[in-house]
Image (cartoon, rainbow, N blue to C red):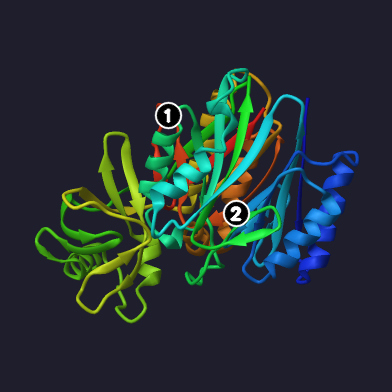
Amino acid sequence: MTTSAVAISVNKSAVIAGKEISKEILIKLDQKRPHALIVFASSEYDYEALLGSLDDNCRPEILVGCSSAGEFTDQTQKEGAVCAIGICSDKLKFSASVGTRLRSDMAAAADDIASQFLGLSRHDYRYHTAIVMTDALAGYTDDFIQALTIKTQGKYQLVGGGAGDDAKFSETHVFFGRKVFKDAAVALEILSNEPIGIGVKHGWQMASAAMRVTEAEGSCLISINGSPTIEALQEFAAESGQILDLANPLPFFLHNVIGIQTAHGHKLRVPLAINEDGSIACASTIPVGATIHFMKTSVKSAAEAAAQAAEMALAQLNGTKPKVAIFFDCVATRLRMGLDFDFELKALSQSLNGAEFAGCNTYGQIARVDGQFSGFHNCTAVACLLP
């Protein structure tokens, strides 16, 4: 049997917030110690104090999580808060691991995590899943997910997101027990004999003609169709009747992301800033030679994408009712939608037929699932359902 509980606190004292969440989770779990506790916390908190309070008061066997940029449950949406999911189960087997030095040795970080996975050496569980949270500001997340897939022999479906810091884009962290890490990733391994559903969907559509990336370095998009990227942006803004304020481009960027064309659809990348040379800094890497489009969306499309992600995940449960869902969505989506982000969460809740959920806004979303749109995403709804 699997039981779960979600809780959220807006108390600005890390110690008190930890106590409030622990109390609520233990009440919902009939005072049972959680086998796993997943935590998402605003950058307003003293993380070591928060994790210490959660560990002392909730006493989870495993505690993992990350800093975030907006926190929510099926009951409420907050900013500057902390939320958590506690899980007890005699059907799920949990373990956790951490990998450090993402910037200097991404492959070693992936190996550090994968080497601790129990499912690589035992064969009494049919399904292998890992919830992965990473310091996305360290970069190389696409490569890290690929390396982790190789290190785990392709046996694991991966889901998660990049840690946030309330849209400051300055410093992000992951949590492992009572410890706080930068330049690192953490993974919660879940072994099961029933499938765990993962759904991935975005509601963006093409808004421009196809273009070619002619020069890029990592997440810096230097030229499109042989010309500085800024020229393509200005041309598209004029054609679409929009205002691109070079001194404050973020409002334009939030409504006009870049879609990398793939065999399974468009993988999204959010522009963040205009550099002096006319290049733009993006939230994630864009490969040279890629075919791209400027993309558009709406509040309705974003809400539908969240619902469809949940429905995709539900379809994988083989008729089993979901117990709890973990939901990751982009900070850019929250910033763009504002108060309308609540419509997305309501659409998600309706698709889950009353199952509780918790999650956060992240700096990129992780999903590696057979037959789906896999990799590291921006502006994409990702739902993970436990049966």
In the rendered structure, which amino acid carries the disc numbered 1? Gly
In the rendered structure, which amino acid carries the disc numbered 2? Cys
The quadrant where residue 319 appears: top right
Residue 61 x %, y %: 76, 43
Q: Which residue is mark 1?
A: 154
Q: Which residue is mark 2?
A: 360
Left or right, 264 with reference to 226: right
Residue located at (43% from left, 56% from top) = 102
User: Would you place residue 186 above or below residue 9 in this image?
Assistant: above
Residue 187 x %, y %: 57, 44
Residue located at (55% from left, 25% from top) = 121
Left or right, 382 with reference to 354: left
Residue 202 x %, y %: 43, 44
Is residue 380 visible to us here? no
Residue located at (27% from left, 48% from top) = 260
Residue located at (53% from left, 60% from top) = 334
Mark 1 neighbour class, 10 Å CA radius: few under 14, some 14 to 19, many 20 or more: some
Q: Quadrant of the N terminus?
A: top right
Q: Earlier in the sequence, mark 1 or mark 2?
A: 1
From the viewer's side, name the closer residue of 13 and 185: 185
Residue lying farthest to the left in this orientation: 226
User: Would you place residue 257 above or below residue 235 in this image?
Assistant: above
Mark 2 neighbour class, 10 Å CA radius: few under 14, some 14 to 19, many 20 or more: many
Q: Which mark is residue 223?
A: none
Is residue 138 visible to us here? yes
Eye-nearest disc, 1 or 2? 1
Q: Secondary structure at mark 2?
A: strand
Q: Report the Cα–Cα distance between label 1 and label 2.
A: 27 Å
Residue 50 x %, y %: 74, 63
